[in-house]
Amino acid sequence: MLRYSSIPHLIAFAALAFVFWSMLRHHARRHVNSWLLAWTFVLLHFIAQLFNFGHGFWGTVLATISLLTLDLAGIAFVHAASRLDLMQAEPIAMLAWATALLTYGALVVWGVEATLPYYVAVAVLAVSICLVHFKVRAERTLLDNILSFASGLVLALLLGLLVHQDQMGYGIDTTLSWLYLIAGIRYWQRYPHKTIGVFTAVLGFLAASFLFPIALIVRAMYVPHLTIDIAIKNLPKFIIAIGILLTFLEEEIGRTEHLALHDALTGLPNRRLLEDRLSNMLERAERNHTRAAILVVDLDGFKQINDTYGHAVGDEFLREAALRLGKVVRRADTLARSGGDEFTVLVSDILQPNGAKVLAQKLQTELDRPITVRQFQLCVSASIGVAVYPEDGGTAESLCARADADMYRAKRHSKGSTESPAKESPSVILSPQ
């Protein structure tokens, strides 16, 4: 006999599983794979609920499948929301942890009254939680370690207490509530930027977690006329799905924006973002009556590296050169890749007129040291052009033209140095970050 009321939910979750399958095809990541697995288990849960065979053998089999797939969905949600891949870190302990939860639920569904199997499942659960904790504790913060260890042991203690009081049936609601609560906490921790998608998904996990204690209270109070409608039970799952999809969309938008404004090779701002920051820097310098500067760094001899060792070595060289320059440039300033072998530095709040020249000297010193790429010791020189606002120009165009001209003049005058190296001490010339 079919439960026709489950068909709309079955169709909806089948569509969700298809959506996450499509996402996985284009974005093969661990957490997307786990999300797909979770929604597949939810779909199997509703397939099992579609049939009604009463309380006989096949009815018990379907009830077992329905419960275990819901447990597996919760486990997959926890795994997907976690920043660490626990299955890779400690696969045996994680399998033991999942098996213990599933065994406990199966024992309840099949009406096993002997307490020993329940105690064994709880003991395996506690031991596996300890093993996972000690395996990954070095990769977590102290607060995260306390939360993970304490929450797992609290679940084991609660299940053990329920077995002791011969109330094993309440353990099903306790387990599901714990799984969705932990998934919500892990989801919150996973994303540093608390977007609408993150808030929505966490709200859904918390709502799903609270539904199970409510069901437990209803059962304990024995109020037969007060039941939770299936639509209300499934509402948190749809909220979770909307939140996950929103988070994924927000990530993709952020990634697209980052790629549009940053160099794919070095991760530095590209010319488009550089122009925007240059405009903002000059506006701020004009408003605050401070000096600012633009430095153009051109790597002499880079073409020979590409021609001699190949583009793969050349790309690694550029990445290392960018790291070298980044060590000199303050966080408040901008280092950008403005061309194939050209970098541009924007410096704000310069305290003395020769501050930009001193910075150019520091950049030159960094690039004078050989760069090791694979087994090769590679050396290049750099020609650096400097233009200071307001002395060398009052607009972005005039400053860029002056810096380029200064760079070409330095290239002609003395390969590997600026035209007029600063003689002053480099200390305390730029304002603190």
Image (cartoon, rainbow, N blue to C red):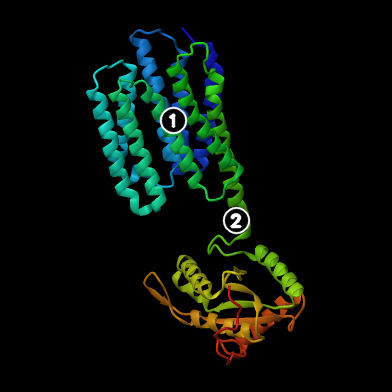
Q: Give residue 228's position: percent from left, percent from top.
A: 52, 18
Q: Is residue 309 left or right of residue 295?
A: left
Q: Secondary structure at mark 1?
A: helix
Which amino acid type is shown beneath numbered disc 2? Answer: His
Q: Secondary structure at mark 2?
A: helix
Q: Is residue 178 left or right of residue 196?
A: left
The number of numbered discs placed on residues in the rendered structure image is 2
Residue named by callout 2: 258
Q: CA distance from mark 1 to mark 2?
A: 38 Å
Q: Residue at x 41, y 50 (%)?
A: 143
Q: Give residue 55's position: percent from left, percent from top.
A: 37, 8
Q: Residue at x 63, y 53 (%)?
A: 257
Q: Observer-nearest residue: 168 or 229?
A: 168
Q: Residues within 10 Å of mark 1 (few under 14, many from 20)?
A: many
Q: Residues within 10 Å of mark 2 (few under 14, many from 20)?
A: some
Residue named by callout 1: 177
Residue 195 to residue 227: above or below: below
Residue 340 to residue 415: above or below: above
Residue 414 to residue 271: above or below: below
Q: Give residue 63's position: percent from left, percent from top.
A: 39, 16
Q: Do we see residue 387 in this rendering?
A: yes
Asked whether the residues under the numbered discs 1 and 2 touch, taking CB atoms below 8 Å apart as contact, a structural biologist would say: no
What is the residue that sits farthest to the bottom in this orientation? Answer: 423
Name which quarter of the figure residue 56 lies in: top left
Q: Residue at x 58, y 85 (%)?
A: 358
Name which quarter of the figure residue 48 lies in: top left
Q: Observer-nearest residue: 17 or 207?
A: 207
Q: Earlier in the sequence, mark 1 or mark 2?
A: 1
Q: Give residue 145's position: percent from left, percent from top.
A: 37, 48
Q: Do we see residue 11 in this rendering?
A: no
Q: Observer-nearest residue: 68 or 161?
A: 161
